[in-house]
Image (tube, rainbow, N blue to C red):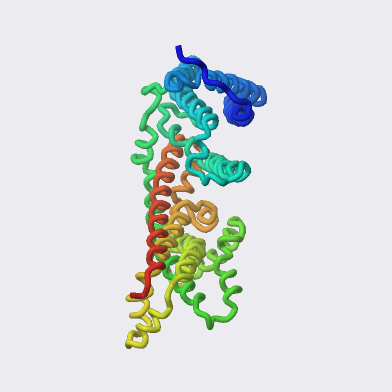
C-alpha cells in the first residue's frame, strides 16, 4: 500500500480557507433553497474543508478519489432531488476535487509569470471570480425561464417532474400555442412590420447625424450630441408621455386634414416613436466607428473629381458599414422589445409582441409568455453575436493602411 503524502502546514493554511469559502458559497445556495441560508453556508464550509483535508491525506490516489467524490456527490443529490440534483452533485464533486488539488499542488501558478507576488496572484483570480459572479447574477434570471418554457403544465414554476427530468413533464405545447394562436401571430406580425421600418429610419437619420457631427467645423457639437442621445438618457415613461401628446396632435392632423386612415396613422406614430428611440444607438456606434476613419481617403476622392454622394457610398460607407449595421441591430432590438412607448402611442391595432406579453402576464397569466421570451432570448443572442463579429471586422478595417 502506498504511503500517505506528507502535508506541510503552509499549503494547508492557504488551501483549506479557500475551499471553505467555496464550500460556504455553495452551501449558502443550498441552504437558502431550504430556508436555512446561514446554516447551509456553515455546514457547506465545514463539509468541504473536511473532504479537502481527506483528499490531501490521500493525494497519492488522486484519480481514484476523483471518481469516488463525483459519484458520492451524485448519489447524495439523487437521493434528495432526483436526476437533476444528481447531475448537479456530480459536477460539484468534480469541481471541488479539482479545486483542492489545483490549490494544493500550486497548479494555479502554472500559467502565470513566476515573479508575481501573492497579492498579485490573488487579484488576478479574484478579479475573474468577481467578473464571473457578476455574469452569473446577470444571466441567471434569463436562463431560468428557458427550461420553464418546456413545462408540460400551465405553471410558472418548476414542477417535481421537471426536477426529476421526467420526459412527460416537458412539452412543446406553449410553443405550439404561440405559432397557432391568432393573437400572438398578429402581435408578431406587427412587431416584424414596425421594427424593420423604424430601424431603416433610425439608421438613415442616425448615420447622417453622426457623419455631420464628426466634422470639425460644426458648432455646438456637444450640445447637439446631448440632445440627439437624450431619448436614451431620459426615463422612458417621460419620453412616452411627451410622445403621446405630440403624436396625438400629429395623428389628428393627418386624419382630419389629409384624410389618412386611422389604422395607418397608428402604425406611422409607433414607427416614428420607435425610430426616435433607435437613433441614439446608431449615432453612438457610427460615431465610434468614425473615430478611426482616415479622412485623407475622402479628400483624395474629392481631388480625383468624385462628388460628395459618390465619395460617401464608394469610400466612406464601406469602411463604416460595420458600425452602421451594429447601430441598426441595436435599433431593431430596441424597437422589437419596446413596450412602454407603444402603450402610450399605439392602439389595439398596433399591439406588438412585447405588448401582448405584458397583457398576457397582467391579465391572462399565459405560460406562452415563457416560450415567447425564450425565442426572444435566442434572437437577441444571435443579433449580439452578429454585432460582436461586426465589431471585430470594424477593428480590422480601421487597422488597415490606405494602401
Residue at the image position 37 percent from the left and 37 percent from the top: 175
Residue at the image position 38 percent from the left and 61 percent from the top: 393
Residue at the image position 42 percent from the left and 66 percent from the top: 203
Q: Quadrant of residue 402?
A: bottom left
* Residue 25 x, y percent position in the rendering: 60, 30
Q: Say left or right for 281 vs 179.
A: right
Let me know if residue 122 appears in the view: yes
* Residue 126 x, y percent position in the rendering: 59, 42
Q: Residue furthest top?
A: 1
* Residue 340 x, y percent position in the rendering: 54, 53
Camera-side residue of 123 and 321: 123
Quick check: 135 above or below 278? Answer: above
Residue at the image position 59 percent from the left and 60 percent from the top: 233
Let me know if residue 313 appears in the view: no
Quick check: 321 above or below 57? Answer: below
Q: Report the quarter where the C terminus lies.
A: bottom left
Camera-side residue of 112 and 183: 112
Camera-side residue of 227 and 69: 69
Q: Say left or right for 18 vs 153.
A: right
Number of callouts: 0
Camera-side residue of 389 and 370: 389
Q: Quadrant of residue 23?
A: top right
Q: Residue furthest right?
A: 38
* Residue 17 x, y percent position in the rendering: 63, 29
Q: Report the quarter where the N terminus lies.
A: top left
Amino acid at each position: 500500500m502506498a504511503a500517505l503524502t506528507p502535508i506541510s502546514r503552509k499549503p494547508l493554511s492557504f488551501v483549506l480557507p479557500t475551499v471553505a469559502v467555496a464550500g460556504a458559497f455553495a452551501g449558502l445556495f443550498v441552504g437558502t433553497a431550504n430556508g436555512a441560508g446561514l446554516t447551509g453556508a456553515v455546514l457547506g464550509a465545514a463539509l468541504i474543508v473536511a473532504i479537502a483535508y481527506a483528499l490531501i491525506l490521500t493525494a497519492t490516489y488522486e484519480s481514484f478519489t476523483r471518481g469516488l467524490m463525483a459519484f458520492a456527490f451524485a448519489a447524495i443529490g439523487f437521493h434528495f432531488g432526483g436526476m437533476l440534483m444528481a447531475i448537479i452533485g456530480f459536477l460539484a464533486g468534480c469541481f471541488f476535487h479539482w479545486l483542492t488539488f489545483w490549490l494544493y499542488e500550486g497548479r494555479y501558478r502554472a500559467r502565470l509569470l513566476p515573479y508575481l507576488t501573492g497579492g498579485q496572484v490573488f487579484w488576478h483570480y479574484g478579479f475573474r471570480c468577481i467578473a464571473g459572479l457578476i455574469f452569473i447574477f446577470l444571466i441567471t434570471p434569463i436562463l431560468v425561464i428557458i427550461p420553464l418554457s418546456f413545462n408540460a403544465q400551465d405553471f410558472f414554476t418548476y414542477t417535481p417532474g421537471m426536477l426529476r427530468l421526467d420526459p412527460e413533464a416537458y412539452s412543446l405545447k406553449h410553443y405550439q400555442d404561440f405559432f397557432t394562436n391568432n393573437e400572438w401571430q398578429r402581435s408578431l406580425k406587427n412587431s416584424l412590420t414596425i421594427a424593420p421600418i423604424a430601424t431603416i429610419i433610425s439608421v438613415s437619420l442616425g448615420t447622417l447625424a453622426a457623419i455631420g457631427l464628426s466634422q470639425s467645423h460644426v458648432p455646438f457639437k456637444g450640445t447637439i450630441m446631448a440632445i440627439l442621445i437624450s431619448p436614451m438618457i431620459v426615463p422612458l415613461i417621460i419620453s412616452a408621455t411627451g410622445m403621446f401628446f405630440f403624436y396625438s396632435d400629429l395623428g389628428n392632423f393627418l386624419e382630419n386634414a389629409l384624410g389618412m386612415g386611422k389604422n395607418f396613422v397608428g402604425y406611422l406614430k409607433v414607427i416614428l416613436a420607435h425610430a426616435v428611440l433607435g437613433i441614439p444607438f446608431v449615432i453612438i456606434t457610427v460615431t465610434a466607428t468614425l473615430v478611426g476613419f482616415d479622412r485623407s481617403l475622402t479628400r483624395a476622392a474629392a481631388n480625383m473629381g468624385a462628388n460628395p454622394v459618390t465619395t460617401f457610398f464608394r469610400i466612406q460607407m464601406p469602411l463604416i458599414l460595420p458600425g452602421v449595421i451594429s447601430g441598426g441591430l441595436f435599433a431593431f432590438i430596441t424597437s422589437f422589445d419596446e413596450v412602454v412607448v407603444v402603450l402610450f402611442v399605439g392602439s389595439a391595432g398596433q399591439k406588438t409582441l412585447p405588448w401582448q406579453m405584458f397583457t398576457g402576464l397582467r391579465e391572462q397569466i399565459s405560460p406562452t409568455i415563457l416560450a415567447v421570451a425564450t425565442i426572444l432570448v435566442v434572437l437577441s443572442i444571435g443579433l449580439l453575436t452578429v454585432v460582436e463579429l461586426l465589431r471585430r471586422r470594424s477593428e480590422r478595417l480601421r487597422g488597415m493602411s490606405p494602401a
